[in-house]
Amino acid sequence: MNSVGVPEIAGNTALLSELRLMKTGAHLPHALLLHGPAGCGKKLIAKWFSMLVLCESRSDAPCGTCKSCRLIAEDAHPDVLYAEHSGKRGGFSVETVREIRSEAAILPNNGEMRMFLFTDADGMSIQAQNALLKSVEEPPAHACFVFTAETVGALLPTLLSRMTAMAVGPVTPAECAGVLNARGYSADEAQPAVSRFGGNVGKCLSYLSDDAMRQAVQTAAALTDAAARQNEYEMLRLLTAAASDKDGLRQTLSLFDLQIRDAAVCALEGELPRLGCDAAAAKALAARYSPRRLMKMHGAVTEAFADLDGNVGAVLTVTALTAALTDC
């Protein structure tokens, strides 16, 4: 947040300008999807958008100083409701969706609109999405639904067709370093994070502030290197060590899966922004495996997540994963 309470958004000036134009032209979407990689700032922009819609200033929204902006900055505005996450995948229960639908029928406490935010909607079940469909299709005039997700494919086509989808783009490494400097990190402190994650501000901040994140990054990078060298023993050693903490294991596997994705893009000579944490290791993996085999590796990681969700023991899960990766 800056000094007057408005979230500081790195980059994405075109996106913010388009949202402002929607507000000034009275063409705000009744349902908005902000999509992009984890850590790119989707939730921060969703909060900024709520301020934009509910700001009391007619000429300088979001102003950050009016009562509405201040309440949103403090997560205390009665007309800004965040849907509560639940379940192993962090989705939204049908009960939660029904509660939101009931709330959407209630007139605003202040102003003209109510905002309903479904952040990190990637794990939203089909049942929950179907329960929400009618509200998004025929919303009350005073209701605006905002979703954030890593990909548009996270939502059903029937739901997606009734909302405006806008991509949140990456910022440059230099812009990211500037944000980190503004947050109190020196250039020397910021450099290792930026070298890992480029312009992904969220991941860089997590890397700098979270010991568990740094450990997961180191393990995922080493695991990528071991897979590139087809060193089964090293893969098993790394995964077994990570299995001592189930949450840490999930984080490691998520980062490793992004490394596999980057390797697949590299193998196909694609130019998509990298999402992983070690470009050199991803390139080494791409040199060893074909895109088809990399997809098999992704499938093996996906199956490992399913095993963990099904309460299969972590050690047994990583043992099976190592065997599957070796067979790819």
Image (tube, rainbow, N blue to C red):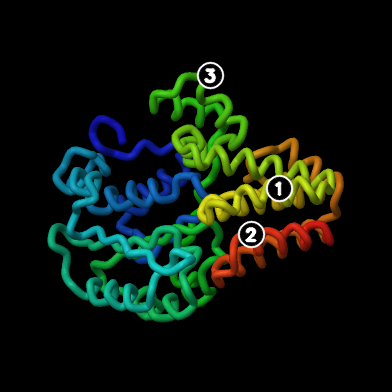
The C terminus sits in image quarter: bottom right
| Residue 132 in picture, x, y percent from top left | 38, 76
* Mark whose residue sits in front, 3 or 1: 1
Q: Residue at x 66, y 51 (%)?
A: 239
Question: Front-most of 55 and 219?
Answer: 219
Is residue 316 something that shows in the picture? Answer: yes
Circle 3: element type:
helix
Q: Which residue is mark 3?
A: 188
The answer to which quarter of the image holds residue 314 is: bottom right
Q: What residue would you read off at disc 2?
A: 315
Residue type for callout 3: Asp
Mark nearer the viewer, 2 or 3: 2
Label 3, label 1: how many angstroms apart (C-alpha)?
Answer: 32 Å
In the image, is residue 42 above or below residue 277? below
Tell me which label, 2 or 3, sits earlier in the chain. 3
Q: Which mark is residue 313?
A: none
Amino acid type at image mark 2: Val
* Separation (CA) of disc 2 from disc 3: 38 Å
Q: Earlier in the sequence, mark 3 or mark 1?
A: 3
Q: Which residue is mark 1?
A: 237
Report whether residue 269 is seen: no
Instruction: Give the side of residue 192 with respect to residue 50, left or right.
Output: right
**In the shown orientation, is residue 267 left or right of residue 126?**
right
Q: Position of residue 167 (x, y in %)?
A: 52, 52
Q: Amino acid at mark 1?
A: Arg
Give the image location of residue 150, x and y in percent: 53, 56
In the displayed structure image, the side of residue 287 where residue 35 appears, left or right? left
> Judging from the image, what secondary structure is the residue with disc 1 in?
helix
The span from disc 2 to disc 1 (Cα, nearest Å) is 11 Å
- Disc tally is 3
Measuring from the top left, give residue 16's x and y in whole percent. Answer: 41, 44
Please tell me whether mark 2 sits on a helix, a strand or a loop. helix
